[in-house]
Image (cartoon, rainbow, N blue to C red):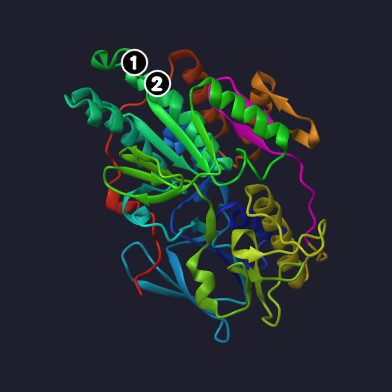
Amino acid sequence: MTRVVVVGAGFAGFNAARTLYRRLRGSAEVVLVNPTDYFLYVPLLPEVTGGILDPRRVAVPLAATLPDVRLAVGTAHDIDHSARTVTYRDPDGRDQRLDYDHLLITSGSVNKLLPIPGIGEYAHGFRNLPEAVYLRDHLVRQVELADGADDEDERTARLTFVVVGAGYTGTEVAAQGVLATRATVRKHPRLRGRMARWLLLDTADRVLPGLRERLSQTAARTLAERGVEVMTGTSVKEATADGVLLSDGTMVPTRSLIWCVGVRPDPLVETLGLPTDRGRLIVEPDLSVPGQPGMWACGDAAAVPDLTEPGQITAMTAQHAQRQGVTAGRNIAAALGHGKARPYKHRNLGFVVDLGGYSAAADPLGVPLGGFPAKVVTRGYHLSAMPGNRARTAVDWTEHAVLGPELQRLDLVDPAQVPLDTRPPS
């Protein structure tokens, strides 16, 4: 039987696999290679850190949502297109090999690193579920340690949190984090009258620099009302165990540096030896890889031409990845005689940014919204976009609205399990 292998079960890979098995109807085997047995709904990770959602809500089981797709749990690390094989390492550390007729690379992205001293040692990333759970525990731990400290300088440092990167992720982390630490501080009488200090840094001149200015203004206003110090035109010059040195020369004592600068394509792309654009695999508008019959790529791993803006490539967003996955699934099915191929073309439908509490910023179809109306739109969008766990997510939101956040420290994730630098040793 013809076999289609999809590498990665993020927004692109998940939607491609689902489209493939629906279109092929058993005429070909679809195999999904992924390090975990779940699809991670990344946009709601800040709510996991904020104690609003149980971590399981954003982890949608692949076996339940893709019952007709064969799941190969493991991390792909070698692709031999001449032999048409994918080699992946399973959870037991053994190498497994898969033959394929068509291959779709949707390996996604990892934390973007910058050559700043100390970042790899002292910064916390925010790209996956272990990192979100670890950060939640870390925030609670710092408040507890501040409560137990007799030294005022140490107490101040432990109650200071620095987020680098005021894009989509960093803005949401700061907005949710300041509410979470505020709720945690209230539970410690020795800290009565103290407030956790949050700083949000970015080299751009405003928060959410990649989105419309109205969204930026709404987010900046909400952050200011909560006491978050937004420092534009500023970044980190050096990180140490005791604090961070900012680019303007200011030394900020802290034990919490949260790295949300951006993402880069998964290192698997580099191993292919094929042409790239900004580290992303070059593809045709139909998502096929030039000169490599049977190889396709989309999502963050691919430099997909933006047909709505000639000469540009699509942004690394969940919205593009989800729709590219559907297009890739259709086009691979068309190559196997099911349907008709078409190029990827998608116009922006707007963005939603959840700012915690009853606040959000959204611009559905270009209509700017803020406050509670934006919150309704934002949560409605997430419920419609999630491929599973909708009812349980809605229950968690309701419970949070009535009872408040659940922020006990569980210490389930060891720091060694969430390194910022995930590049293999040279």
- Is residue 411 toward the left or the right of residue 167 in the image? left
User: Which disc number belongs to residue 260?
Assistant: none
16 to 217, vertically: above or below: below
The residue type indicated by label 2 comes to: Arg
What are the residue bounds of the magenta stretch? Answer: 344-362
Type of the residue with mark 1:
Arg
Q: Is residue 353 magenta?
A: yes
* Distance in Å between CA atoms under marks 1 and 2: 6 Å
Residue occupying image coordinates x 44% and y 59%: 35
Tell me residue 4's x, y (percent). 61, 69
Expressed as whole percent of the image width and height from the top left, the position of residue 232 reads 56, 40
Q: Which residue is mark 2?
A: 182
Looking at the rendered image, the quarter that the N terminus falls into is bottom right
Q: Is residue 290 above or below residue 106?
A: below
Q: Is there CB contact under 8 Å for labels 1 and 2? A: yes
Q: Which mark is residue 186?
A: 1
Callout 1 secondary element:
loop
Seen from this angle, which residue lies furthest bottom? 82
On the question of residue 409 being in view, the answer is no
Magenta stretch: helix, strand or loop mostly = loop
Q: Quadrant of the C terminus?
A: bottom left
Question: Residue 31 in magenta?
Answer: no
The one nearer the camera, 60 or 154, is: 154
Q: Is residue 342 left or right of residue 95?
A: right
Q: Position of residue 9 (x, y in %)?
A: 54, 56
Q: Is residue 235 visible?
A: yes
Residue 413 is left or right of residue 322, and the answer is: left
